[in-house]
């Protein structure tokens, strides 16, 4: 379905939610892969590091909760769109979506990288 043909703001945001959630899942996988690759190299020299099935399940569940919270904030995009996009501009809507999407995509990756940077800088 082409999002250009959706006439209402709520239809457009509802349709784009699928793309948003796919991005969150991909970002979570990338962040977890970075964690698994970098932790033995950066964290292990400073403290005991071991990744167990229980820890992976816990982290997966915690990330699912974060996705739910991110979806609450996603709804703010629709609220801002209906409040400030009086001309129903598709350009405004696309830019607003892109801003929220890339911020949400980068957040889990930047979180892992900040933890790794902390261990590199402080050593603990």
Image (cartoon, rainbow, N blue to C red):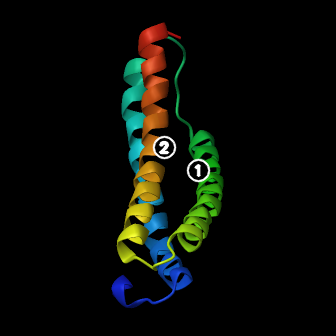
Give yes or no for contact between labels 2 and 1 (Cβ–Cβ under 8 Å). Answer: yes
**Viewer-closest of 1 and 53:** 1
Numbered mark located on residue 118 in the image = none
**Viewer-closest of 75 and 79:** 79
- Percent x, y of residue 64: 61, 56
What residue is shown with label 2? 108
- Percent x, y of residue 23: 42, 60
Q: Secondary structure at mark 2?
A: helix
Kindly identify the residue that appears in the image at 49 percent across and 8 percent down. Answer: 122
- Percent x, y of residue 2: 33, 87
Q: Dot 2: within a 10 Å radius of its alpha carbon, few (fewer than 14), some, or many (20 or more) residues?
A: many
Task: Give the CA separation, mark 2 to mark 1.
Answer: 9 Å
User: Does residue 121 show up?
Assistant: yes
Q: Secondary structure at mark 1?
A: helix
Q: Earlier in the sequence, mark 2 or mark 1?
A: 1
The image quarter in which residue 79 lies: bottom right
What residue is shown with label 1? 63
Is the residue 53 above or below the residue 96 in the image?
A: above
Kindly identify the residue that appears in the image at 49 percent across and 26 percent down. Answer: 115
**Viewer-closest of 19 and 10:** 10
In this rendering, which labeled residue sits more in front, label 2 or label 1? 2
- Percent x, y of residue 20: 46, 65
Is the residue 70 above or below the residue 56 in the image?
A: below
């Amino acid at each position: 379905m082409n999002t250009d043909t959706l006439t209402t703001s709520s239809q457009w945001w509802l349709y784009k939610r699928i793309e948003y959630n796919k991005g969150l899942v991909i970002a979570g996988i990338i962040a977890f892969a970075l964690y698994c690759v970098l932790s033995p190299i950066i964290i292990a020299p400073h403290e005991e590091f071991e990744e167990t099935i229980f820890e992976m399940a816990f982290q997966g569940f915690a990330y699912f909760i974060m996705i739910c919270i991110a979806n609450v904030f996603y709804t703010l995009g629709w609220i801002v769109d209906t409040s400030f996009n009086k001309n129903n501009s598709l350009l405004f809507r696309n830019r607003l979506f892109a801003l929220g999407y890339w911020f949400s995509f980068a957040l889990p990756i930047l979180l892992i990288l900040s933890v790794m940077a902390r261990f590199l800088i402080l050593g603990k």
